[in-house]
Image (cartoon, helix red, strand yellow):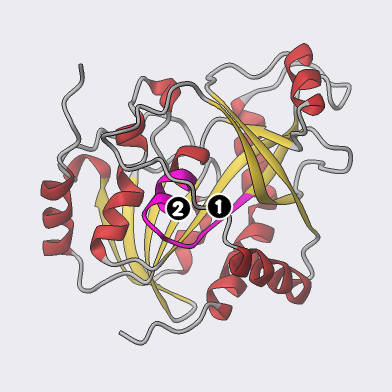
Amino acid sequence: MPASFPLENAREALKARLPGRPEVFLVLGSGLGGLTRGLSGALAIPFDQVPGFPGAGVAGHEGRLLWGELEGRRVLVQSGRFHLYEGHTRELVTAPVRLSAGLGARAVILTNAAGGIATGLEPGAVLLIRDHLDLMGPRDSGRNGVEGTRWPYHPELLALARKAAREEGVPLEGGTYAAVLGPSYETPAEVRALRRMGADAVGMSTVPEVLAGAALGLPVLALSLITNRAAGAGGRGALSHEEVLETGRRAGHRLQGLIRRILRRLPADSS
């Protein structure tokens, strides 16, 4: 059985290096690291300098934590993430969220690259996740604090995101994200099944982090950048990670602008 994640050691190591308490914890998915270029006073900490963290193992994931200010908010940014399909446990996958809570973060914003299933969710679209299908296997509950009965998608943040999208001029669809284990892309038959189950988009991350944040009582917001049509949903051939990264680079500015406006609209932290 894998060793437990050294949460306290990691928290103390980060606390010693960070110049203050983060207000918001922000997770950037595949191809979405461009947002970090706007950080002022940025401090970068590679994953392998955090006790218990491995290095990044997926192309398009920078593999570092960054501290800085974005739109007047103190943010801790996870640029790249850990995935279950890499062989990591849910304990490790959710460790950054739990660390951010221990460091004082008051809200969590998660992003990912996803395949569009619903009609109209073409590459470049943004999906506001308001529900999910967790098809990623056992949750190894009882040790990691990721279980809970609290509805994970915070209604005030959902409303704030919709308002920010209107102001930013970004069409924002609300829907259901299906989280699957991966790492292979879904077959057309699997996509048809997911559509019948109510999924609007599909990806290989995010839901464990959503559940962890909600279990800790943190307001959670999750957004998908649609980087491809899921297999069988768009009449196309084979999918590739390169396509995901390229769409993230081309259309990521839309999601980045939306996140910036959301940060501006978040209630001010009085501490």
Asked if residue 219 lies in the magenta stretch, the reply is yes
In the rendered image, which quarter contains the N terminus?
A: top left
Residue receiving disc 1:
151
Q: Which residues are magenta?
A: 210-223
Using the image, determine if residue 106 lies above or below residue 167.
Answer: above
Q: Which mark is residue 99?
A: none
Spatial CA distance of label 1 from label 2 is: 7 Å
Q: Is 100 positioned to the left or the right of 206 in the image?
A: left
Residue 236 in picture, x, y percent from top left = 84, 21
Instruction: Say which amino acid is labelled 2.
Output: Ala
Residue at x-position 70% and y-position 21%: 239
The residue closer to the viewer here, 13 or 252, is 13
The residue closer to the viewer here, 182 or 98, is 98
Residue receiving disc 2:
214
Disc 1 crowd rating (10 Å Cα; few below 14, some 14-19, many 20+) is: few
Residue at x-position 36% and y-position 41%: 94
Residue 92 in picture, x, y percent from top left = 30, 35
Answer yes or no: do the residues labelled 1 and 2 have beta carbons within 8 Å? yes
The residue closer to the viewer here, 179 or 59, is 179
Residue 76 in picture, x, y percent from top left = 35, 62
Using the image, determine if residue 260 lies above or below residue 237.
Answer: below
Q: Is 6 positioned to the left or the right of 217 in the image?
A: left
Residue 196 in picture, x, y percent from top left = 81, 25
Asked if residue 224 lies in the magenta stretch, the reply is no
Image quarter of residue 241: top right
Instruction: Tell which residue pokes out farthest to the bottom in this image.
Output: 270
Using the image, determine if residue 34 lies above or below residue 198.
Answer: below
Which of labels 1 and 2 is toward the front?
Answer: 1
Instruction: Say which amino acid is labelled 1.
Output: Trp
Q: Is 227 positioned to the left or the right of 42 in the image?
A: right
Name the element at disc 2.
helix
